[in-house]
Amino acid sequence: MVERKNINRGFKKLNVWNDSISLYRQTCQLLRNKPFELKRISSNAIDASQSISRNVAEGNCRRSIKEYLKYLYIALGSSGELHSCFYSMFMAEQITEEEFDGIDVLHFKVENELIQLVKSLERKEQENDWLDRMPDK
């Protein structure tokens, strides 16, 4: 695969984006072979997990810090939705404690990375340390 780089693909350097891609992959692997009656909740969990990386990417591609933060907060909402999906599946004995703990470790990491990125950008916003246009070079 050829790596194509430009300023709009800078999100690929973010740990939170890479870890959220791993979380999506792990979610798909965990829920891939669940019985038919769990297809809807599995589909919702997979969508929530993918929504995290999509919103990190979309926010990063926006030049406005306010828009970037908006998409990061949407990613945090998807993260909460994903945790709720997994926790309810665990409580309903649809996934094992081992499966829940295995995915929750990575989920917790992604969630904390998102929180730290939001805090960092909110500081930049307060300090007016953000360029809301494409850089000259």
Image (cartoon, rainbow, N blue to C red):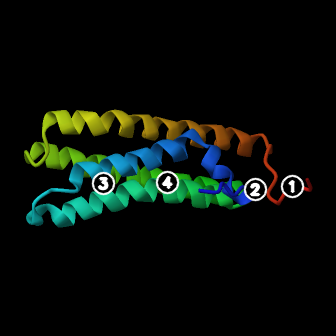
The alpha-carbon separation of the residues under discs 2 and 3 comes to 30 Å
Q: Residue at x 19, y 66 (%)?
A: 40
Q: Which residue bears the numbered disc 4? A: 53
Quick one: label 4, few (<14), some, or many (20+) residues within 10 Å? many
Q: Which residue is the site of mark 2?
A: 7
Q: Amino acid at mark 1?
A: Pro
For marks 2 and 1, give the CA distance. 9 Å
Of 81 and 103, nearer the camera is 103
Alpha-carbon neighbours of circle 2 within 10 Å: few (<14), some, or many (≥20)?
A: few
At x 27%, y 34%, the residue is 102
Q: Nearer the viewer, mark 1 or mark 3?
A: 3
Q: Amino acid at mark 3?
A: Cys
Look at 60% across and 43% down and name the residue there: 14
Residue at image mark 1: 135
Helix, strand or loop under label 1? loop
The residue identified by callout 3 is 28
